[in-house]
Image: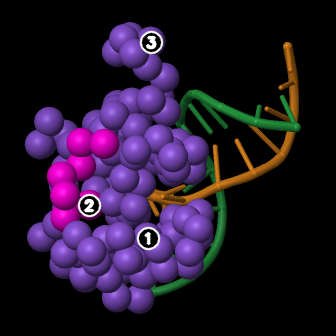
Chain colours: A purple, B orange, C green
Amino acid sequence: MKPETLSFFDKVYEVAKQIPYGRVTSFGAIANFLGAARSARMVGYALNGSVGKDVPAHRVVNRKGLLTGKHHFEGTNLMQQLLESEGVIIEDNQVVNFDKVFWDPSKEL
DNA sequence: TTGGTGACTACAG
DNA sequence: TCTGTAGCCACCA
């Protein structure tokens, strides 16, 4: 678990784990924080394998606040339910108050 | 070892 | 303003 040995995936997990309760962030924000702003796809790919690793992947959405990754969760609306249980309003698979709950790792960390 | 893939993003027309 | 295309890079087979 040395920082130097952490792979890109592990770094994504570390950042995702630090997302505060009731907050969400975007793939691009994480990618940018890791110094790979144009590799946002890798962030999503990483989160694909984050299920079961205590990583709140449901708090990571795309730039518009859309729950594009909810398909990778067990239930079709599991991701939405998890967010709503944290006080995040979801409508049409999108975070309504995205601006309010957005958490930027490059600024918060 | 090489090629394909992906929960995205940004730029150009 | 909206739509389409290209790029990006690590993991898996």
- In the image, A4: left or right of B1? left
Residue B10 location, quadrant: bottom left
- In the image, C2: left or right of A14? right
Number of numbered markers: 3
* Above-or-below relation of A13 to A45: above
Determine whether the residue tagged by mark 1 lies in a helix, strand or loop.
helix
Query: Of the numbered discs in the image, which one, if any, rests on residue A5?
Result: 3
Where is residue A9? Give x, y as percent.
Answer: 49, 33
**Range covered by the magenta-colored residues:** A17-24
Dot 2 amino acid type: Val
* Above-or-below relation of C5 to A27: below
The N terminus of chain A, quarter of image: top left
Dot 1 amino acid type: Met
Q: Mark 3 or 1 closer to N-term?
A: 3
Query: Of the numbered discs in the image, which one, if any, rests on residue A8?
Result: none
Identify the residue under disc 2: A24
Where is residue A79? Give x, y as percent.
Answer: 43, 70
Q: Looking at the image, which residue is at 19% across and 58% down?
A: A21
Residue A61 location, quadrant: bottom left
Identify the residue under disc 1: A79
Q: Nearer the viewer, residue A62 or A6?
A: A6
Q: Mark 1 or 2 closer to N-term?
A: 2
Determine whether the residue tagged by mark 3 lies in a helix, strand or loop.
helix
In magenta stretch: residue A19? yes
